[in-house]
Image (cartoon, grey):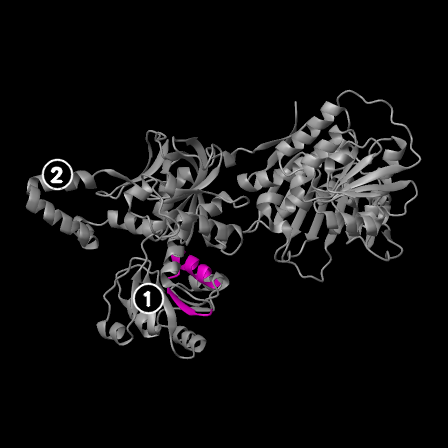
Amino acid sequence: MKQVVQNYRSGELALLDVPAPGCKPGGVLVRSAYSLISTGTELMKVSEAGLSMVGKARSRPDQVAKVVQSVATNGVPATYRKVMGKLDSWTPLGYSLCGVVEQVGDGIDDVSVGDVVACAGNEHALHAELNWVPKNLYTRVPDGLAPRHAAFGTVGSIALQGVRRGESQLGEVALVIGLGLIGQLVVQLLAASGVRVVGVDPDPARCELAERMGAVACGEPGSPAVAASVAELTGGHGADQVYLAAGGTGNEPVELAARLSRDRGRVVDIGKCSLDLPWNAYYEKELDVRFSRSYGPGRYDPEYELEGRDYPIGYVRWTERRNLACFLDLVARGRVDVEPLVSHTADFDDAVETYRSLEDGGLKAVAVLFRYAGQAPQTAAPEVTVPAVRRGPTPSARPRKASVRLAFVGAGNYASSMLLPHLTGRDGVELSTVVTTTALSAANAKRKFGFTEATTELDAVLEDPSIDAVFVVTRHSSHAELTRRALLAGKAVFVEKPLALSEDELAGVLAAVEESGNDRLQVGFNRRFAPLLQEARQRFGDRTGPANLRYLVNAGRLEHGSWYLQQASQGSRFAGEGGHFIDTASRLLDADPVSVYAVATPGGQDLQVVLGYPGGSTATVSYLTNGPAGFPKETLDLVADGRALRLDDFVRASVYDGRRRWVSSRLPKARDKGQAAQLAAFVRAVRTGGPMPVPLESLAATTAATLAVRTGLASGTPVTLAAAR
């Protein structure tokens, strides 16, 4: 494998071929996807290696003291050989990366092969294709967080530990001196904590970046604007906390900290700068000077880092590993944004040239990533299999029915407002039984909609031969299992989206179809049935060439406490409703998608999903949560063969063909997204014994494409949707 190394004696950098590490007990073998260059710490080490022997000695007086002690103990010749031998050896670089677990050592049960993890440590998270990482120095990456962002985990933990040492409180004012990589992260973490931040850095570009990331004001160290901003924010008292995130040998940072701190303020040293404290200034204000030791408690403790002995959470709340997981969670939820900090991404093969460019100033950067192209799994386009629809023994002919008896499993808000009103009192429909988890909700649904029976027992419904169809309108996590059971019981099934939350769940549903021969399934993709969409599609006409479709979904933010936010049990928000938009695109393009490419903003709530279709057609679904409330929720444009179709939130449609323009003649009294038409088609199919409104193959393809979005976000590459063989 390849690894970046440096000879500390000569300063030479190299990308060496070295043996791959073994997978020892108590850790995992990780194949790197992205690793982060710390442009402060690592470049300082690289620069020191280029100094003369005298320069090296001046820069590391701590090491000189060790040499003096060794001379006294072992003599000059032995000490010389020892020092020269150590200097004239290759040393590793790097300490922050994200990769994929390739092998799991004995004693590890919290991750599996294929899991994406963030890793820390200047002996374990190196710029190398493979690293062995002990248990307390890695953590699983949250779903939806891009590997390139997870590579910031270690550096983010350093910044987070510094903020913890400052003990910031809501409403305080902080001064951050030094707006390099650590300083920029400290700014964001403080702002996310409700602290108002003023930044200091001699680089105007870094000041501007910090202001975009949440700082109230920033300026150069000697700028009167900095002191004025602190005075204005604090009523002239001074900053509650000062974070020293600067490097260099000058004493200006600690002097500025004393000048702008309030009485008994806190000064936290995170970086490596001169700390010649001006005694009078610090004494008169009785400043509390604190040091922040790297990633947090556990650092430099071999029992914690190498032997995996964790500290009890009741005694040490935030350890090294817990800080790492916490920072990744903040990035995943959009509270910290690391993408603007990435100045450059370089292929790992260009590592030496990248370091040289950084050292000579040709590349000015806050953060640089190494991308391990061709080796991390992300570089190979993943493939998601669309399960084949295989029907088992064909059941006997389905007789026509004068009326159909329906059972509802679940009677929550959506069922009560969007489905049941279209079925209550409908000719040829009998609402037989409602099943809910609590007796009172079942009784309420029976009274309100006229069900014959109300129960909390699902088995009684599935075993009742008089019931023709079952509606599954429960929370997302139960859809696949309830659908599977109803199909095996021989019922026609209408299940609200999503059909499944995983590939295994989808395969289980289709296995039930094969086992029973019962393919009577409809998923609640109602938009394809919307009258306005149907009319616009008819007026658009058939096409011959490839089409481009754009679907903008202004989803809006969810209220606090919404069960849609329970991603661990109910799936992501897009997994829950994204099938609506993919199905609509597929209907307009008369095909099922063959590829999916997805990118997300930090936190994974806002998505851009590009769907590829046969013949070169594409559909882009922009799923956004940060739009204004008054803007239409759904707008759609389709362009092909010199024609264009536009749909505005299911209240207005238009078609352009170059010569004339058709616009829907009148606005509907209310948005009609097709629920009534979809239910009518389903009931008709059940009553007549005819085919379901949407082919099962299309329902499976739409569900597989929706699930592939998660795979694509994790890999950062397009996902091929391959038919099962």
Q: Earlier in the sequence, mark 2 or mark 1?
A: 2
Would residue 501 be found to the left or right of residue 316 on screen? right
Q: Is residue 278 above or below residue 131?
A: below
Q: Position of residue 502 (x, y in %)?
A: 62, 36
Amino acid type, residue under disc 2 in the picture: Arg
Would residue 37 be found to the left or right of residue 475 on screen? left
Please tell me whether mark 2 or mark 1 is closer to you in this view.
Answer: 1
Q: Which residue matches tag 2?
A: 81
Q: Residue at point 86% right, 46% down?
A: 423
Splitting the image into 4 quarters, where does residue 555 fall? bottom right
Q: How many residues crowd around disc 1 within 10 Å: few (fewer than 14), some, or many (20 or more)?
A: many
Q: Residue at point 70% right, 51% down?
A: 552
Q: Residue at point 91% right, 30% down?
A: 400
Amino acid type, residue under disc 1 in the picture: Val
Label 2 SS: helix
Q: Disc 2, disc 1: CB below 8 Å?
A: no
Would residue 344 be found to the left or right of residue 683 on screen? left
- Is residue 71 in view? yes
Q: Is residue 362 above or below residue 15?
A: below
Range shown magenta = 171-191
Would residue 208 be found to the left or right of residue 84 on screen? right
Most foreground residue, 460 or 418: 460
Farthest residue, direction top: 393
Which quadrant, please, contains the C terminus?
Answer: top right
Q: Which residue matches tag 1?
A: 267
Q: Is residue 723 magenta?
A: no
Which quadrant, please, contains the N terminus?
Answer: top left
- Is residue 34 in view? no
Most foreground residue, 95 or 556: 556
Farthest residue, direction bottom: 236
